[in-house]
Image: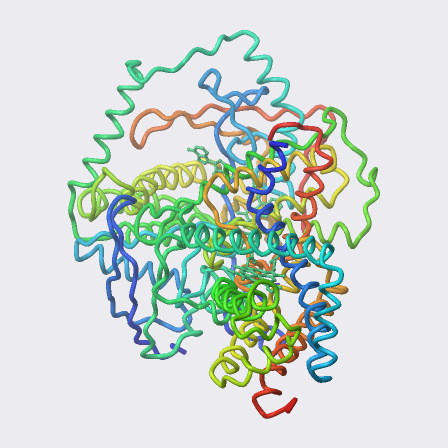
Amino acid sequence: MFEIYETITGENPYKSPMMIYPAPHYTMGGLWVDYNLMSNVPGLFVLGEANFSDHGANRLGASALMQGLADGYFVIPYTMGNYLAGDKPTLVKTDHPEFEKVAKEVKDLTNKLLSIKGKRTVDDLHKQLGRIMWDNVGMGRNEAGLKKTIEQIRQVKEEFWKNVTIPGSGDDVNQTLERAGRLVDYFELGELMALDALDRKESCGGHFREEYQFEDGEAKRDDENYSYVAAWEFAGENKWNLHKEELKYEYVKQAIRSYK
Amino acid sequence: MEAKKLNLTLNIWRQKNSKSVGSFAEYKVQVSPDASFLEMLDELNNTLELKGEEAIHFESDCREGICGTCGLVINGHAHGPLPKIATCQLHMRNFKDGETIWVEPFRAKAFPVIKDLMVDRSGFDVILQAGGYVSINTGGVPDGNAIPIQKEVSSLAMDAAACIGCGACVASCKNASAMLFVSAKVSQYALLPQGQPERYRRVERMVKVMDDLGFGSCTNTYACEAECPKGISVTNIARMNRDFMMAKIKSKEVEV
Amino acid sequence: MGWFFKFLNSSIGKKFMMAVTGSFLLIFLIIHLVGNITLFFGAGAFNTYVSTLDVIKPLIRVIEVVLLGAFVLHIFNGLRLWLENKRARGITYKVNGSKENSTIFSRTMAVTGSIILIFLVSHLATFFWRFNVHDPMGLATHHQYYDVVVYFFNIWWYSILYVIAMLFLGYHLNHGFQSAFQTFGWNHNRYFPTIKKIGMIYAIIMALGFASMPIYFLLGGGN
Ligand SMILES: Cc1cc2nc3c(=O)[nH]c(=O)nc-3n(C[C@H](O)[C@H](O)[C@H](O)COP(=O)(O)OP(=O)(O)OC[C@H]3O[C@@H](n4cnc5c(N)ncnc54)[C@H](O)[C@@H]3O)c2cc1C
Ligand code: HEM
Ligand code: SF4
Ligand code: FES
């Protein structure tokens, strides 16, 4: 570990103090699934980090790998088999209208991206988005910051669609194009994260709303109003519908967690 | 405290796609000694894109030496001149002001260039698939320490499992041989009790696919070990040779 | 038997064949050197040695056939490996850092091997042919083997080429010795460093041993 540190920073950690800074590790949540780990698309199962299910508002140490193990070892072998027992998978054909529709959408998106030919690079805009998220949607969040963030994200997104430049074509591998496509997703994800954080007027887990804290600075939950998982359903650009998944505990009693 | 920037000349392999013929292109860059090699390429790509030129294609993912996607040959060395690191862990302070740097893709018949510095290493996946499964009992939760394993043996298996599948061994071997990679994958199972049921079948199949894919034969130059970012030892190759010969005698399969 | 030929045609099988034949040749060289040392003890000793070999001719013939087989397989396989391995690279590197990651001995096996092959042909033509088949000078026919050796080793350029060839033999053996152990799977951190050392000592003894003979005669020894 110390050797790795030295190759990266060029400083000997035994001699000079180590430089440590927080980094976004991952987001909480994921795709909605039912108890069988099937998403709202029939037959599309989501397991591991990609689903929302096993962890709460926090990812405690090693819980991520455990989730992969639990889903893969104990759940999926039974539920997927169960699903397949009632469904005869047929060959998927590329002339299926749904396939053609999606293929056309992707082609249109690609052409649209390539035709902008603006003055800013994907990397540049990506960094701008990152900075915005870093400033206001990190661990500590507050209403004013989040509202501003949503505005800012929409502005960068607009700037992106007007002024991005993507050299090359869509016929071959084009990493710039790939990144642009991902950035388009990130605009959406970033905005949804900010929206969800704004909507949840309490502090819990990795979400610390500065307005909701105890005097000693500990997170203040509001179990009365927010004891639910927020499942946001996509409803067109900049629009999501909230579905509340109630959290019901039979054996465990909810309590304040203090790290002091 | 901004360190003085380095002026460097980069000669980078550019190749439009797998079918076209590539050549070197020269770029002059100014870069902070604290930048990583890949960050330098990112910056260069930014300036190229602003000029409307296509970005230099290279692969990377984790940028911390664990995923194995980022291999480049820098001044004749896979993953650059420093030992035991991946390209993404190489920093510009290891170069001198005014230096000329040659950047080439991993070269092997079995690793065709996709574009610029990006090569198709999927042959490795095919080899792994040929290795097949490991028989284990699922269902109940196995007891943590049900199978005793000598500490030294589990360490050896872990050392072998440290291979990140980057392909630097193939790139640096004068024969483009994949023996170090395959032997690491064979060893990580061959050493452990859990790997015994399919031990000989696994090695026979993996070696066969390795040969079919057009990797060269090992001539024991040990360049792979010297260039491997994870320090995988050539004793793994010896173990694989042993297992392969044993498999010819012991394997239950008649045809492979 | 199909499986066996498939094995020999696999990458590891080809290596295995190199190592088996190479090891056999390594042992042969020791015997060859020990026999040739009689040269230093004068005409009588050497001629007696060669004549003794004549007495056990049938056994020698068998060994010679095996030796020929070993050489042919070793050379055929070596050149085949060299060609196939060149092809496996495809486009070569503009900058090659192999100097820093491997020894020159290991990278030049095909070159040193080919030099040995050229030497081998001339060696067989001069000594083997004259001793066993026909000596235009008639010396060997009268069991004057020693004089044949003296004759050739007094040709200064022949001796110098011979010494150079032995240098390359040493190169080849230095890598080949330990390489054979690795191929057989006998690489263990406990004893492999020792094997490498023994290989080097073996290579030096062989190269110096065989080279000492032309040098000895060139410097006027044996007269
Ligand atoms: C730096 C870091 C450190 C971590 N440390 C810990 C830790 O100490 N303890 C812990 O418990 N957890 C840790 N985690 C989290 C944990 O590693 C992950 O949650 C877990 O590995 C996720 O496993 P997964 O199988 O769900 O997803 P992944 O491992 O991400 O697998 C997803 C797979 O899908 C493939 N894929 C993606 N798109 C496609 C496509 N279109 N078609 C086909 N395949 C596709 C990907 O290539 C990938 O192989 C860490 C994570 C990170 C990033
Ligand atoms: C007295 C003569 C020779 C001896 C004792 C000898 C010995 C050896 C040994 C022990 C090896 C190592 C095998 C291994 O890596 O497992 C080797 C490799 C090799 N030999 Fe020879 N050899 C001799 C002559 C030749 C000749 C005439 C050639 C001709 C081309 C040759 C070509 C090679 C090549 C190319 C290799 C490398 C192959 C590899 O490592 O896979 N050798 N030799
Ligand atoms: S053995 Fe080393 S060089 Fe080869 S693929 Fe594995 S990590 Fe990379
Ligand atoms: S980017 Fe993952 S190892 Fe370099």
In the displayed structure image, the side of residue A116 where residue B130 appears, left or right: right
- Examine the rendering and report whether any part of residue B228 can be seen: no
Exactly how many numbered labels are in the figure? 0
Residue B235, how many percent across, how many down? 67, 56
Of residues A195 and B70, the one drawn nearer to the viewer in this rendering: B70
Q: Quadrant of the C terminus of chain B?
A: top right
Tell me which corner region of the image, top left, top right, bottom left or bottom right, holds residue A84: top right
Locate residue B149, reporting x and y percent: 81, 46
Q: Residue at x 47, y 83 (%)?
A: C157
The quarter of the picture where residue A56 lies is top right
Residue at image position (69%, 73%) is C33
The correct choice, above or below, for C58 with respect to A89 in the image is below
Q: In the image, residue A121 lies at what x, y percent?
A: 24, 52
Horizontal and vertical percent position of residue B219: 55, 57
Q: Is residue A185 above or below residue C192?
A: above
Residue A68 in the figure: left or right of residue A164: right
Q: Is residue B245 above or below residue C49?
A: above
Closer to the camera in the image, B27 or C75: C75
Q: Nearer the viewer, residue B16 or C29?
A: C29
Residue A34 falls left or right of residue C178: left
Q: Quadrant of the N terminus of chain B?
A: bottom left
Residue at horizontal 71 percent and vertical 53 percent from the top: B156
Give the image quadrant in which the ligand numbered 2 is located.
Answer: bottom right
